[in-house]
Image: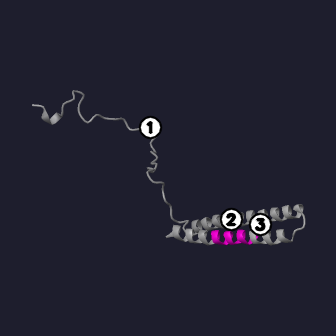
Amino acid sequence: MQGVKEKAKDMASAAKAKMKEQEAKMEEKLEKATARSEVQKEIVHERAKVKMAEAKMELHAEKAQHREESMMRHHHHHHDAVGVQPVHHDIRPFPAPSVPAYPVSGTHPVTKK
């Protein structure tokens, strides 16, 4: 459920960023139409690029904020990585000696006759 909420917020932020980019493009076209020289047209184009970059920057900032909000809501849950075994620390200074299950002869003591 958490991922769905994040995706919905991300999609809304992306739509907002796209609207700002389109707005910048339309303003650029209008200003270029009234510009009298190539230098003015180039300045208008650079301003439009700045506005589009700001829209993208805001999009990424909002996405990061969505992740932070999600983490803060669910900070008490702890999920381990899949396939990772928990580490158990042995408090003994040395490992226990290994004792063979059968005598050194290799035969099971019950089967002796």
Q: What predominant SS class does the magenta segment belong to? A: helix
Give the percent coordinates (x, y) of residue 85: 43, 50
Q: Nearer the viewer, mark 1 or mark 2?
A: 2
Q: Earlier in the sequence, mark 3 or mark 1?
A: 3
Q: Quadrant of residue 40?
A: bottom right
Report helix, strand or loop for mark 3: helix
Report helix, strand or loop for mark 1: loop
The disc labelled 1 sits on which kind of residue? Phe
Instruction: State how far apart marks 1 and 2 are (Cα).
Output: 52 Å
Q: Nearer the viewer, mark 2 or mark 3?
A: 3
Q: Which residues are magenta?
A: 13-24
Question: Could you say which disc has been placed on residue 61 in the image?
Answer: 2
Q: Which residue is mark 3?
A: 51
Q: Is residue 38 above or below residue 88?
A: below
The disc labelled 3 sits on which kind of residue? Lys
Q: Nearer the viewer, mark 3 or mark 1?
A: 3
Residue found at x 45% / y 48%: 88
Q: Are marks 3 and 1 in contact (CB under 8 Å)?
A: no
Residue found at x 60% / y 68%: 10
Q: Is residue 97 left or right of residue 42?
A: left
Residue found at x 52% / y 69%: 4
Q: Residues within 10 Å of mark 3 (few under 14, many from 20)?
A: some
